[in-house]
Image (cartoon, coloured by chain):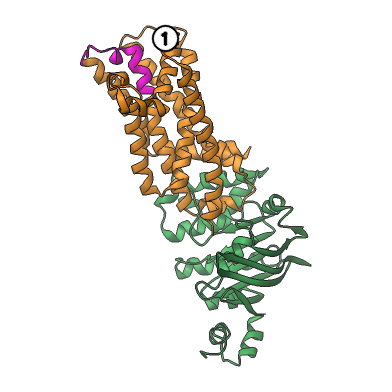
Chain colours: A green, B orange
Amino acid sequence: MIAIKTKKLTKKFKDKVAVNEIDLNIKRGEIFALLGVNGAGKTTTIKMLSGLILPTSGEIIIEDMNMKKDVFKIKEILNVSPQETAVAPNLTVKENLEFMAGVYQIKDKEKKINELIKQFKLNDVLNKKAKTLSGGWQRKVSVAISLINDPKILFLDEPTLGLDVIARKELWKIINSLKGKITIILTTHYMEEAERLSDRIGIMANGSLIDVGTSEELIKKAKTKNFEDAFVSIATWGELK
Amino acid sequence: MRMINFAKRNFKELIRDPLSLIFEIVLPLFLLFIFQQFNIPADNYRLENFTPSIILFGFSFITLFTATLIAKDRTSSLLIRLGTSPMKSSDYILGYILSLLPIVLIQNDLFFLTAIIMGLEFTISIIPTILVSVIISIFFISLGILIGSLVSEKGTGGLGSIVVQLVCFTSGMYFPIEAMGGVFEAICKALPFEACLNIIQGTLHNDFNNLTLVHIIVFLFYFVAVILLSIIIFKKRMISDNK
């Protein structure tokens, strides 16, 4: 079953083509990593898939709904953890969770909030204002918030950026536990992260999706020893190996 | 209701910023108190005239802090997150407006309470004055939404201060603008602040002799134009900020 399908998805900013005719087919429950160097078009793609910006042309189908016609229905079933931490600074961690539960009109919000507090071990910072937390904690809270509506589709834009190694491993564990339950689209600059977490990986360069496959398939295709080398080779069209 | 939920969040953000409370409530209260101690022999400074002036002065800070809140929200990723949620534009705009109304009511109550303690006669017309002030405050909140949508957080300080100065010098709060005459008077008449003050004062005095048709037309023009512009620009910036 396909959760996300795009047909010739394109975004132009004046003359610059940020995303160029991307065709994606992401299966339900799959973790799909979107990799690329800075400016490759990953974040623009995620913004279009999450309904934040409109495509210049092309089509987006999410869970059998068309983004053009059913944008608000689609927004009910997805969530995003943006690249920069997205929390209300003067609200405590608990209030941030309550606020976002209100945004998604969660019925049993106390139950859901307690579940996230336990899952992300937020007890120690629960009553602290978000702006007083370290960057790592803010990111953790930001990712926790993105699960408040039990999304069917979750976009994680650089979720472990700024996290220390232990926090990163903890978050990997949480993301892995979601495998099969939620369709996750992940962008990251950490090759190890993409390799460990994702079922398939899409590599973008200059706005185009230039290759898709499992890490093993991409290593084999690029004829390299490891995934990092495979990524470099594919993203530079073989110029760097 | 998403809009109420958003308004609650905005209200918490605003009241937890001590500077916002100092400028919106404490400073106007201080001015109200201190000017009465000088016994200035001019009509503008009589309690029944100066209390409405202080209400308007407080609103200019509402504009400043609304603009700052929105500019801050725009630069943080919070609006990106909210932009991917099922919230609609009306939820944002009404959420911002609703969050400021309790502060407007607190301002009005405290200003009138202080004025009554200092000798303002309590009349029933205080109640409609507060209601009229709430309507006028929507203009000032919308002006804040407009400024916050147009410029960065740093820019809101500059533009917000201009609004504060315009209220002080073009509303007739400190001196009758007719006394200045000429171009200055014409500018004051073309701006909405004198009209706002005359409406509030007229309601409090239950005497609308100073309120002309021009005042009403000027106020209604700015009221509608600023609300419409704030909605259009905010919606546009929500999209362009996310490019």
Q: Position of residue A161 (x, y in %)?
A: 48, 67
Q: Position of residue A3 (x, y in %)?
A: 74, 64
Q: Position of residue A13 (x, y in %)?
A: 55, 64
Which portion, as a residue range, is magenta?
B38-55
Identify residue for label 1: B205
Q: Quadrant of the N terminus of chain B?
A: top right
User: Does the magenta-highlighted stretch encompass residue A64?
Assistant: no
Q: Nearer the viewer, residue B104 or B195?
A: B195
User: What is the quadrant of residue B21 in the picture?
Assistant: top left
Q: Secondary structure at mark 1?
A: helix
Q: Residue furthest front?
A: B182
Q: Nearer the viewer, residue A134 or A158?
A: A158
Position of residue B141 in the picture relative to residue A119 (left or right): left
Position of residue B93 in the picture relative to residue B125 (left or right): right
Q: Position of residue B230 (x, y in %)?
A: 51, 40
> In the rendered image of this protein, does residue B10 appear above or below residue A60?
above
Residue at (38%, 18%) from the top-left corner?
B52
User: Does the magenta-highlighted stretch encompass residue B52?
Assistant: yes
Residue at (53%, 65%) from the top-left corner?
A159
Q: Residues within 10 Å of mark 1 (few under 14, many from 20)?
A: some
As shown in the figure, which amino acid type bears the numbered disc 1? His
Main SS of the magenta part reads: helix
